[in-house]
Image: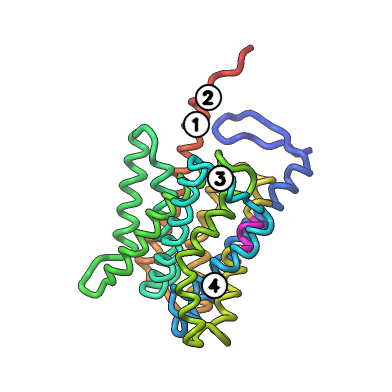
Amino acid sequence: METFTEPGTGRGRTQSAPAQGRILGGVLTMTASGISNQVGAGIGAHAFAAVGPAGVVAVRQLVAAAVLLPVARPPLHRFTWRQWWPTLLLGAAIALMNICLYVAIQRIGLGLAVTLEFLGPLAIALMRPRSRLDLLCAACAGCGVYVLVLPGPSSDFIGIGIAMAAAVCWAAYIVLNRIAGQRLPGLQAPAAATAVSLVFYLPVAAYLLAQGSLAGPALGYSVIAGVLCSVIPYAADLIALRHVQPGFFGVYMSINPLLAALSGTIMLGQFLVLHEWLGMVVIVATNVAAILLAGRGRRRSLPASPG
């Protein structure tokens, strides 16, 4: 047993070695998930020239559906409309989120696209009764975005806008996933939503196959992206959430913009300049602060235990 002091309380608390081991295992799993996701995005970008972002997303969704549907086996014919409508909207959000992110990666680079996409979870964390700290977080996020992109005549405003659209879709994904997950057991909601999102890309896959573009290295890159960006992170996140609290999970996953920047540098030669690094740090720090504040607000709202 090891004794440590809780921050801000001065009170000592003991934590067992097995508990520490579980937390360490969760951290390592989350790190592996983030690396897999961002490396997969970098690999998928190598197929853009041959099949475009839509082709990569089509294969990625096909891989995800091929894994999730046999595992979850959602009884689609038994779904009620109350279960179908959030599932349909969730599938549409997934489809639009992925294509927006990949188009943004093509236009403005992996690090910037992923950092701007993280404004989606940040917005969800700030969607509660406003306080001065909430407003401060929102202002910091705005400053971070400005420093990140430094708008000017040479700025790719279309790429920035598409990345912001991916952020909106991610926020919608979080809300809809929560609703669908409450109405469908296990993995049925994400599996069914993945199947819905695949429907949007079947015409793209069919066209590329007919043209002979979806073959060779482009197909290999896209399949690898599907495995690294969908299959491995999904399984890793499920494992990690068995060992760490959701709040800690949300905070730690804020390392993804940093991992994306490193992946873009190493795999795609996309070097960020100083103001882009500064903007990224501000947005990530704001995201962490917003999640911590949201968690503190939920704890304060809980009724005191009797006795």
The three-letter code of the residue at mark 4 reads Val
Badge 2 vs badge 1, beta-carbon distance below 8 Å: yes
Nearest the viewer among 116 and 148 is 116
Q: Which residue lies at the image location 57% right of the left edge and 68% below the top edge?
A: 62
Crowdedness near tag 1: few (<14), some (14–19) or many (≥20) residues, C-alpha within 10 Å: few
Q: Which residue is mark 3?
A: 79
Asked if one can make out residue 283 in the rendered structure from this viewpoint, the answer is no
In primary-sequence order, the first of circles 3 and 4 is 4
Q: Is residue 148 above or below residue 272?
A: above
Residue 143 on the magenta segment: no
Label 1 vs label 4: CA separation? Answer: 39 Å
Side of 130 where 121 appears, left or right: right
Label 3 vs label 4: CA separation? Answer: 26 Å
Is disc 2 placed on a helix, strand or loop?
A: loop
Label 2 vs label 3: CA separation? Answer: 34 Å
Q: Which label lies toward us, 3 or 4?
A: 3
Q: Which mark is residue 59?
A: 4
In primary-sequence order, the first of circles 2 and 4 is 4
Q: Which residue is mark 2?
A: 302
